[in-house]
Amino acid sequence: MNNLRGVYTIWYRDILRFWRDKMRLIGSIFLPLLFLFVFGSGLSGMMGNLGPGVNFAQFMFPGIIGMTVFMGSFMAGVSVVWDREFGFLKEVLVAPISRASVAVGKTLGAATVALIQGMIILLFAPLIGVSLSAQTVLALLPLMLLLAFSMGSFGVLLATRIRTIEAFQAVMQILMFPMIFLSGVFFPLQGVPTWMSILTKINPATYGVAPIRQVILGASPDSPFSITLLGHTMSLWNNVTVLAVFGAVMILAAMRSFSTQE
Amino acid sequence: MNDYIIKVENLVKRFGQLVAVDNISFTVAPGEIFGFLGPNGAGKTTTINILCTLSKPTSGQATVNGFDVVRQQMQVRQSIGLVFQDPSLDERLSGLQNLHFHALAYHVPASVREQRIEQVLRMMELWDKRHSGVRTYSGGMKRRLELARGLLHYPKVLFLDEPTLGLDPQTRNRIWEYILELRQREGTTIFLTTHYLDEANKADRIAIIDYGKLVAMDTPDRLKKIVGKDIISVKTDDDEKAAEELRLRYQIEARRDNNGLTFEVASGEKFLPIFIKEFGIKILSVSLRSPSLDDVFLKLTGREIREEETSDAFKAMVRQHGRRLRR
């Protein structure tokens, strides 16, 4: 009970911050929209259809949803580094809240914020020529939440080990952007060079983007966008399972890592 | 009921080779203002960090409000309030929101939450600014908000780590009024670290700490009796000759520094008229004062605390400034 309350307290603060900071919301959806409309519209005409009835912008749309959720939750998770830099982490660490609850609350806060950002991008579907039924949206929300939760806990885990703002910036450059580029957001992962193919398959974000695309563009096994792992074509549930296992490992590691902070 | 609310026994904290806290023991009585006095790096903050469960001792034991700081962390945290040396507010939130967070975290019952928040905000004179973002607050307002926050859950012990570092004298005085009022009203025990001597004077008891060791612990008045004598500072035409004459004529060993000569005499009022009349070297200025805690510290450790004050204020300024630049 006390732990739940602690989780709620930490989550509540992230939500407060989110509401207070409207500029951050605009900033966080601007980049995905820029990619979607400039790249998507710009390249669609030139590239023709990537699959049956799917042009480049329509292909990229599920990827952009994934990217928004990924960036939003990961960065919010890593923002613990800023709390340390500006001193607020001390207030949290000395409060009668267990460290594990802090890690979970922070992850849920990051996931909630990222989910809202992703939902805003969903509203742009009609402009890209993607039609979403209520059923599709209902299927997307848990997938987005799982991706947000997994990447949020990954961010929190990293933040417990990052001591400086410089290291934080390095993590952003070296980890976040390659993970986005190599997750199938911008191009189909079939037919990429072997070295890249290996990287995309060890990239957990791949298994977060793929099911979102499967729900929006269809999940048939012979889809040109499906992922094959060790010769096995990944079904929607296969992808979800890989992501869920990653998320479970990350949240447990984050809880543990937070508990040993001094 | 125990006659102490904090008990520290043989506490040691090592960081690698460095012994930051070296086998210290003391108790603090309920309702007491207990001051930890010492220069930077003496082990004051390390001790506070152990007492508030942010850091684990290498060896030794400590209890706060009857709870062990290693084995009963949650109970200790619930019992204490903290005002840190560095700000620990969420600058993106309003003052009110910072307090709401704190009230939730410390299980302040919902029925009294709003009323208590209003009470502490009014006490710290921040009620009118409650909806403004903390980043628009001045340094003094932030410190007052932190004090308000530290009091919100009615802690048994309030830890103040250099509570007025880098603040202007008026703000320092105001904050002290609040602290004394709080002790009066709530009977809160206050554990204070400082290297401002006037601040240490307000404590009921002072522990002087240097290189991780407790070198003395008593009331400010009794500590001053360690020095015992009055202190005279003189500036002369020729300090070297003057020191020589003091030695020959009065058997007094004076200390020399840039400001002239300093020495101790049993009764300054009687000594001074004779001294001025008799002395062979031209005296430019002379002052007489009773012993201060700085003199006590000097006597016990051979060094002054005061020297570091300016550099600290400067450091605090640079830190604030640096933050703003990085943002």
Image (cartoon, coloured by chain):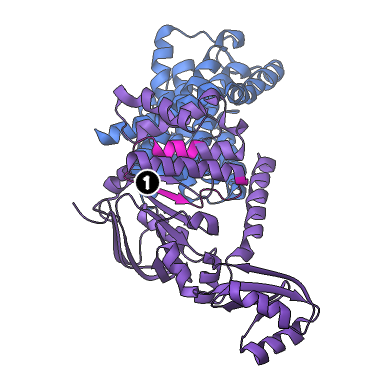
Look at the image and tell me whether residue A210 can be seen: no
- Residue B147 within the segment the image draws in magenta: yes
- Residue A95 within the segment the image draws in magenta: no
Q: Which chain is blue?
A: A
Q: What's the residue at 79%, 81% (across, down)?
A: B238
- The quadrant holding residue A230 is top left
Q: Secondary structure at mark 1?
A: helix
Q: Observer-nearest residue: B308 or B216? A: B216
Q: Give chain B's shade.
A: purple
Q: What's the residue at 45%, 67% (across, down)?
A: B208
Three-letter code for the amino acid on which mark 1 is drawn:
Ala
**Vertical arrangement, residue A103 with respect to residue B303, above or below:** above
- The quadrant holding residue B152 is top left
Name the residue beneath numbered marker 1.
Answer: A253
| B64 left or right, relative to B301 | left
> Over which residues does the magenta segment extend?
B145-169
Measured as percent of width and height from the top left, residue B100 is found at 41, 28
Please, which chain is the residue tagged with disc 1 on?
A: A
| A26 left or right, relative to A247 | right
